[in-house]
Image (cartoon, rainbow, N blue to C red):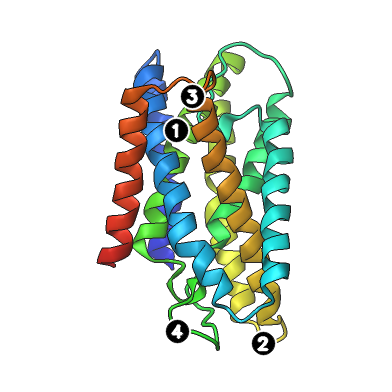
Amino acid sequence: MWINVTILLLSALLPGLVVLRVSPVNEKNLKLFLVFAGAYLFSMTVIHLVPDLFLSGEDPFNLGLYILIGFFIQKLLENFSNGVEHGHIHHHGHGYSVGFILIALAIHSFLEGSIMTDSLHSNHTPDSVYSHGSSPKILLGIVMHKIPAAVALMALLVSQIKNKKKALALLLLFALGSPLGLITSEYFSNSTSFPESYLVIFFAIVTGSFLQISTTIFIESDPHHKLDWKRFSVSVLGALAAVLAQLSF
């Protein structure tokens, strides 16, 4: 678990530190990477997380309902974060304040980190998401998603806060979200007083959050419904990478 905690922490800290050294950010390349990461995350959610949820033995209707709830919870968080978790770089202040953005991002990061627990083993199927939630293929998707989010957040902090030390401190708060989510989820998954079904429901909500994030990236990469072949090719590569990862480990 602690290796995953360290990776999640560094996946947000290191890109943010790079932004301090490299300015301005190459937004064109960042968007292409975001499309790849979004395609990977969407594909991994569809071929791994969703099927495993429905193999958990819980009522399929309830699971679908909680996935929908997670989808709309993330939609609300996105409203307060100004889309920073989607890699949106804002150089000028607009929308909600930095404080609101950080709170929304922290909640989002906490949720995505929580699914990485590896202590909960479903009684219904040994190959469920709960026994393989911390697998490298899931971790890779989260890390790829966090990199553009960290870059976008630091670009915003640099433009709004002239004090670099304060900007780094705020970046650290964001970076701690996913590790804390993993540690908390690990604690409750080992608690005998916490029903396993509650964690299944919680992970369904997180899965819905992943679906909202990844589908939003797809929609924004083609806002005028005109196919961009470069972005389409990158998204196909991202999906193929997820398929290969699922088949490999």
Residue 183: image x %, image y %?
A: 56, 65
Image-quadrant location for residue 182: bottom right
> Mark 4 = which residue?
126
In the picture, the quarter occupied by the C terminus is bottom left
Specify which label sits upstream in the sequence, 2 or 3.
Answer: 2
Of 207 and 114, which appears nearest the observer?
207
* Badge 3: residue crowd in 10 Å (few <14, some 14–19, many ≥20): few
Q: Is residue 171 left or right of residue 32?
A: right
* Residue with the mark numbered 3: 222
The earlier-in-sequence mark between 3 and 1 is: 1
**Amino acid type of the residue tagged 4 in the rendering:** Pro
- Give the residue at mark 1: 148
The answer for how far apart the CA atoms under marks 4 and 2 are is 19 Å
Mark earlier in primary sequence (1, 4): 4
Discs 2/1, front: 1
Q: CA distance from mark 1 to mark 4?
A: 34 Å
Distance, label 4 to label 3, CA atoms, is 39 Å
**Which is more foreground, mark 1 or mark 4?**
4
| Residue 237: image tag | none
Residue position for label 2:
192
Residue 37: % across, % down: 40, 40
